[in-house]
Amino acid sequence: MEYVIAVTLHIMSVVVWIGGVTFVTLITFPMILRMDKSLEMVLMFQGTEHRFVKIAKAMVILAGLSGFYLLYEKGLSTAVIIMIVIWAVYASLIFGLEKILFAKLFGKPEDQNDMKKVFKTLQIFHWVILGLSFFAIAAGVYEAHY
């Protein structure tokens, strides 16, 4: 019974977490990039990020806890290694590495064009991590069913 609960919690946390990343990548960034003013862009991003980051942190923690329990129960496999690597990347980013990286990469943008460049780079970065996330999900589904 504990195993079924852990699988359910794991899948639900991943759906909310990756669903949020999908929303930000496919909806929020295109909306931001259509804006004309840097301040509007920053406010839109911060408004979305501040609301989602708390949810994402909780889901990353829940996915990690349930995932490590499932690892203990089922053992290590190629799909599990892929999921652990993706989880570790997300966890490190969401708990501080992202701010450090982007502060070093961009510093403080000084004009509108710089801000567009920052958000285009963020969008590309989100596409990469979203693609990696879908790859990890596909590996887990494949392993569970074949």
Image: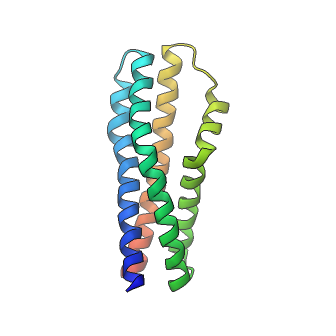
**Total numbered labels placed on residues in the image:** 0
Query: Camera-side residue: 25 or 61?
Result: 61
Residue 51 found in image quarter: top left
Rendered position, 131 above or below 116: below
User: What's the coloring here?
Assistant: rainbow
Q: Is residue 94 visible?
A: yes
Residue 120 placement, left or right of 33: right
Q: Residue at x 54, y 59 (%)?
A: 86
Q: Residue at x 40, y 15 (%)?
A: 37
- Quarter of the N terminus within the rendering: bottom left
Spot occupied by residue 109 in the image (x, y as percentages of width and height): 57, 19
The single residue placed furthest to the right in the displayed view is 104
Q: Residue at x 56, y 55 (%)?
A: 91
Rendered position, 116 above or below 50: above
Residue 11 placement, left or right of 104: left
Spot occupied by residue 38 in the image (x, y as percentages of width and height): 45, 17
Rendered position, 73 above or below 138: below
Q: Is residue 146 visible?
A: no
Q: Residue at x 45, y 47 (%)?
A: 54
Spot occupied by residue 72 in the image (x, y as percentages of width and height): 55, 82
Spot occupied by residue 50 in the image (x, y as percentages of width and height): 44, 38
- Quarter of the C terminus within the rendering: bottom left
Rendered position, 52 above or below 68: above
